[in-house]
Amino acid sequence: MKTQHELLIGGKWQTAVSGKRFQTRNPATGEVIAEVAEGDATDIDRAVAAARKALDGPWGRTDPSERGKYLRRMADLIRKNAEELALLDTRDCGKPITDTRTVDVPVAAEFFDYFAGLPDKICGSTVPVGDGFLNYTLREPVGVVGQITAWNFPILNAAIKLAPALACGNTLVLKPAEDTPLSALELGRLSQEAGLPDGVVNIVPGYGPTAGEALVRHPGVDKIAFTGSTEIGKHIMRVAADTVKHVTLELGGKSPNIVFPDADLDAAVAGALFGIFLNQGQVCCAGSRLFLHETIYDKFMEKLLAKAKSLRVGNPMDEKTQLGALVSAKQLKRVGDYVESGKAEGAKLEIGGARPKDSKLDKGCFFTPTVFTRVKRDMRIAREEIFGPVSCVMTFKDEDEAVSLANDTTYGLAAAVWTRDISRAHIMARRLKAGVLWINVTTHFSWATPYGGYKESGFGREMGLEAIGIYTQAKDVWVNLSREPNPWCN
Ligand code: NAD
């Protein structure tokens, strides 16, 4: 059944001023599942005004501990509506229902719980400046925050944006990805049920070049928190410069996964598969470059290919499915084009590289788990983010070569190392240039730990206590303790 959705602006559900709507499809079936009001610059303007009014009004005066209670209610409401939210993301995004039930939705609730404890612990400091003065800092919200998200973890990407921004006392306008706007709209509805004052949370779906760009350009927006591609992230940084906005960027990746010969090979095989094929490879920190020590290459590949062949691609609503559909026909074409480029540049396609041969999946955007060997560091498939279920395997002969290959990328989001040698593990953790380092594990994170990129994978950390640094600003207060007038005037 097709549902209809409006924009959440100033606590009211409103149609777009233009009257336009766009459709969102279930990528596993091709069926249109919803029609969504299409926000543009005019709607963004109204949403920013509502967010400003709420910031200058009730929300700006809300006690920190009260702010925490709203967030706790959000966590509870997500849990109460967990099944509906899981179904929504599975239908909108094509991801397996087991993933949305066990990871995306419960972890989204955890984000609100974690940040619910924060508001009354965000402290300024006193600064020792000598006898004549008292100096202290206030940590104040940045203000009205514009948030723009990617489609790969719809509810989770939205929760990662909303929870820290609200904990720090900001108000916000969220523009979710046009491919998957539904769970963000539902979070908007839950924010009303949680009792958040009107205008604190505004949700304005729409397209990037219209609604997204208007948010970045808007002079009433103090900060942009962006999750998406490096290409658009660079553009956002340029546009935001005109109004000197705070900017944080969670961008793309091409993360290395390095296996040394002393590793537990079965664990490393399982980790490599999870690292690249989870969410159909549509994960920013996916271990898309797999580096194997040359002495274990044959044994490792035999195990990896056997297991990769047995992965279950299928209907996302089936609890046994491990890989669902890619998000859209556009993404399916992108992945297919990269596979062709890999073949043309001389990489060896070991498995996959095509749509599954199952007539039941014909209408959906499915793609089989794909593994390339004989990949060279200068090939496009080794350098560019594919954002699909494609693993690129290379070999190395020693630690130095592994580091050189792994760091030979413009990205720096995550890196994984498999070894039982504790010294090597920690030395590699220091030598690899990435914001997140995994030892004997892949694609693992928590609301409590800082997550974000080095290099062209972005900057700013929205998880853990580091989020305070990007969602507040320091105000420094000088108090003159002297009873005498300024001697300069004598
Ligand atoms: P994208 O950059 O095309 O779009 C991301 C968002 O930006 C969407 O909401 C889109 O509408 C908006 N947008 C597009 N053009 C815009 C413009 N001119 N101004 C303002 N907003 C604009 O990325 P995508 O294809 O949706 O997502 C995939 C990318 O996201 C991958 O590169 C992936 O690695 C990255 N990602 C990163 C993280 C992270 O935490 N680092 C997490 C998830 C996804």
Image: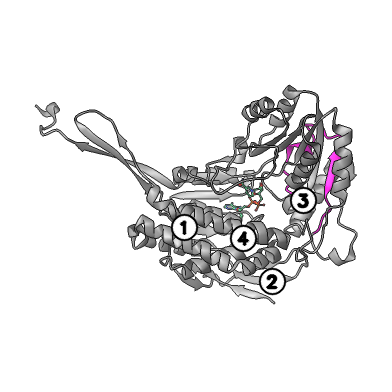
Q: Which span of residues is magenta-colored?
A: 366-388
**In the picture, residue 79 is in which quadrant?**
bottom right
Label 2 sits on residue: 33
Where disc 4 sits, the SS reads helix
Counting residues from the N terminus, which is met first, the one under dot 4 or under dot 2?
2
Between circles 4 and 1, the one closer to the viewer is 4
Per the image, is 26 magenta?
Answer: no
| Residue behind label 2 places its C-beta within 8 angstroms of ligand 1 | no
Q: Is mark 4 within 8 Å of ligand 1?
A: no
The answer to whether residue 426 is visible is yes
Residues at marks 4 and 1 touching, judged by CB atoms closer than 8 Å: no
What separation in Å lies between label 4 and label 2 (alpha carbons)?
A: 20 Å
42 in relation to 285, above or below? below
- For residue 180, which quarter of the picture? bottom right
- The label on residue 105 is 4
What's the amino acid at mark 1?
A: Leu
Asked whether, in this view, residue 334 is left or right of residue 72, the answer is: right
CA gap between label 4 and label 1 equals 21 Å
Provide residue 78's location: percent of width, then percent of height. 56, 64
Distance from disc 1 to disc 3, alpha carbons, whole Å, reads 32 Å
Colour setup of the view? one colour
Q: Quadrant of residue 16?
A: bottom right
What residue is shown with label 3? 334
Q: Foreground residue, 230 or 457?
A: 457
Labels 3, 2: front one: 2
The amino acid at mark 3 is: Arg
Task: Name the element at disc 2.
Answer: strand
Residue farthest toward the bottom in the current orientation of the protein:
1
Q: Visible in this render: residue 208?
A: no
The local crowd at label 2, few if under 14, some if 14 to 19, many if 20 or more residues have their Cα within 10 Å, is many
Main SS category, magenta section: loop
Q: Which residue is mark 1?
A: 172
